[in-house]
Image (cartoon, helix red, strand yellow):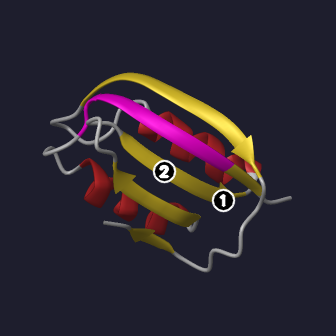
Amino acid sequence: MVKHYNIVVKGKVQGVWYRKSTLEKAWELDVRGIVKNMSDGNVYIEVEGNKTQLKTFLDWCGKGPELAEVTDVSIEEGDVLPYTMFEIRY
């Protein structure tokens, strides 16, 4: 069963390749959605996949790429949308 999560990642997550690394992890796990920088310095993610895919993805979001310093990850379940791939939004 496919689920949808809206995620906000806080900390030092901009200027550290967080979006690009998120895109690569999403492709690796075959999940769909978007990632984008927010004006407040956080990163916003919408992701869809099965339970196993999402567990692995959420665990990764809490760490991020090597240069990131994640301080908080907030997650809300949402309605499944018609995403067909994962992409960076600007």
Quick one: 64 or 42, which is closer to the camera?
42
Q: Judge from the rendering whether residue 52 lies leftward or rightward of residue 88; answer left or right.
A: right
Q: Is residue 15 above or below residue 75?
A: below
Say whether marks 1 and 2 touch (CB < 8 Å).
no
Q: Main secondary structure of the magenta part?
A: strand
Q: Which residue is mark 1?
A: 48
* Residue 37 forms part of the magenta stretch: no
Q: Is residue 48 above or below residue 54?
A: below
Task: Identify the image quadrant of residue 89.
Answer: bottom left
The x, y position of residue 59, in whole percent, is 51, 35
Helix, strand or loop status at disc 1: strand
At x 56% / y 54%, what residue is drawn?
Answer: 46
Q: Residue furthest top?
A: 71
Quick one: 34 or 21, which is closer to the camera?
34
The range drawn in magenta is 5-13
**Badge 1: residue crowd in 10 Å (few <14, some 14–19, many ≥20):** many
The amino acid marked with disc number 1 is Glu
At x 44% / y 40%, what residue is drawn?
Answer: 60
Q: Which residue is mark 2?
A: 45
The x, y position of residue 44, in whole percent, is 44, 46
In the picture, the quarter occupied by the C terminus is bottom left
Task: Identify the image quadrant of residue 13.
Answer: top left
Q: How many marks?
A: 2
